[in-house]
Amino acid sequence: MTYKLVIVGGGRMGSALAAGLLDAQWCAPDELAILARSVETRKELDERFPGASVFASIELVDVAPDTGALLSVKPDYAEGVARTIGAVGITRVLSVVAGLSTQRLEAAFPQPVAVIRSMPNTPVLVRKGVSAIAGGSHVTSADLDWAESILGAVGTVVRVTERNIDAVTGLSGPMPAYLYLVVEALIEAGVHQGLPREVSRKLVVDSFEGSAALLSATGESPEILRAQVTSPGGTTAAGLRTLESHAVRAAFLDAVAAAAERSRQLGR
């Protein structure tokens, strides 16, 4: 059996992408191979993705000339893994390894390999992910199209230069966590005001979903939509004034900057 794609790393992001790609029918289960080092992880992946093949190492995979790889491992292991998968003839790689440049990955392969770097976020699991891609020195337009076909099956894709990938890593990569923290805080705020937790959760989660849909559907700037909700001297104005006094805007600026800098550190 030869495979259309080998996902190297069956952790959170690798398994989320596998689930999204299979749900989108980007490939059939028997066209997908997943590599995982842990016996327990392999067992979980076998149960979660019936029909897909789960292996302990790339040497067990029947690699065809057009088989691509999706690299989803921790930065510390990525270069060693690159050497291993390059040795079996993989020539096209989509890397979702945080912080690791295409130049460093290219240098790890024993032969020229088309390396596309990306940073998707976890909503790929429900085909609502946001990803940015940037190509290395051996990448053609066909390679970028291939990478976009993978990530486009599970969400939105933008093409950027590699120097912008660290900024993407700081912004959209961790954004689900940023938003979940806000949701968590707002639910708690509703409970503090006397609402039952399940009611507060529904109000917050559905308001997030509706607000995002409105922002997307209208194409209006967030400033305009925020102004439409804010009556002079009203309740919203009072709440926003408190948020600004606590420097919430500055906290988000600092959070994105810190995450982007951490991405740069991982790549050094």
Image: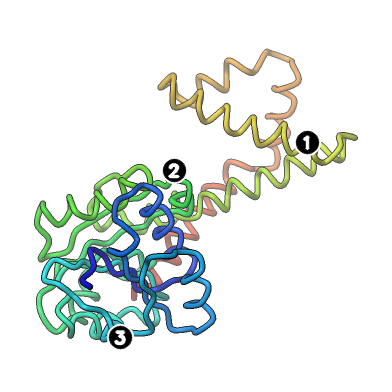
Depth order, front residue of 143/108 = 143
- The crowding category of the residue bearing disc 2, from other C-alpha atoms within 10 Å (few below 14, some 14 to 19, many at least 20), is some
Residue 128: assigned label? 2
- Give residue 107's position: percent from left, percent from top: 18, 79
Residue 116 is drawn in which quadrant? bottom left
Amino acid type at mark 2: Lys
Q: CA distance from mark 3 to mark 2?
A: 31 Å
For discs 3 and 2, the disc positioned in front in the rendered view: 2
State the residue position of label 1.
200
Helix, strand or loop at disc 1? helix
Depth order, front residue of 24/17 = 24
Q: CA distance from mark 2 to mark 1?
A: 24 Å
Residue 40 is drawn in which quadrant? bottom right
| Residue 25 position (above or below residue 135) | above
State the residue position of label 3.
80
The residue positioned 43% from the left and 83% from the top of the image is 37
Amino acid type at mark 3: Gly
The residue positioned 39% from the left and 66% from the top of the image is 98
